[in-house]
Amino acid sequence: MDEAAQEVIRRAPAWALALLRDARVGRLATADAAGRPLVVPVCYVFDGARCYSAVDAKPKRTRELRRLKNIAANPHVSLVVDVWDEDWSKLCWLIVEGRAEVLAGGAEFTRAIDALVAKYPQYRALSLDRTQGAVIALTPDRVLAWRAVEPRAAGR
């Protein structure tokens, strides 16, 4: 990971990084070369540096997914992770803006698959393939974070 991406992660609030690490689903936003947006829910894993999402074997109409075509045409993406609750004091969200690339093999691809399998037991049942397929790797350029209630300082 480059120095700029490391600094982005260092500057993010600890609670936002914990949410990014622990959340079970995010929404990946891509856009094609003409700027037409696409937002899809994704399972992902954050390894402390990058976010990874696999194109898995769940039924899809096609393996030529629009999100992959969009990344090839325009690597700028966003990943949104949020917490919703009827108690609005519990609301929070974060947005990871950055550059995506599609991995189709190699050591980083394998590490990403292993991390996804470790986070999601469902991937063990699907036998997520470590030798083929695609993984989207997101390198952060910026992390935006918000929560409804900031914790009070000790002693107040």
Image (spheres, rainbow, N blue to C red):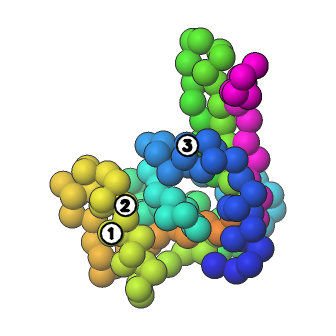
Which residue is at a point 74% across and 78% down the rendered structure image?
A: 3
Quadrant that contains the C terminus = top right
| Residue at the spot of label 2 | 116
Q: Position of residue 124 (x, y in %)?
A: 21, 58
N-term-proximal mark, 3 vs 1 = 3
Image quarter of residue 112: bottom left
Left/right of residue 34 with respect to residue 82 in the rendered view = right
The magenta stretch spans which residues? 141-156
Disc 1 residue crowd, few under 14, some 14–19, many 20+, Cα 10 Å:
some
- Rendered view: 106 above or below 26: below
Q: Amino acid at mark 1?
A: Asp
Which residue is at a point 61% across and 42% down the rendered structure image?
A: 15
The label number, if any, that marks residue 19 in the structure image = 3
Which residue is at a point 64% across and 24% down the rendered structure image?
A: 91
Q: Residue furthest front?
A: 155
Q: Amino acid at mark 3?
A: Leu
Q: Residue furthest bottom?
A: 106
| Nearer the camera: disc 3 or disc 1 | 3
- What distance separates the C-alpha of mark 3 from that of mark 1? 20 Å
Q: Amino acid at mark 2?
A: Leu
Circles 3 and 1 in contact, beta carbons < 8 Å = no
Which residue is at a point 70% across and 27% down the rendered structure image?
A: 154
Circles 1 and 2 in contact, beta carbons < 8 Å = yes
| Residue at the spot of label 1 | 114
Q: Position of residue 137 (x, y in %)?
A: 55, 70
Quadrant that contains the N terminus = bottom right
- Rendered view: 149 above or below 68: above
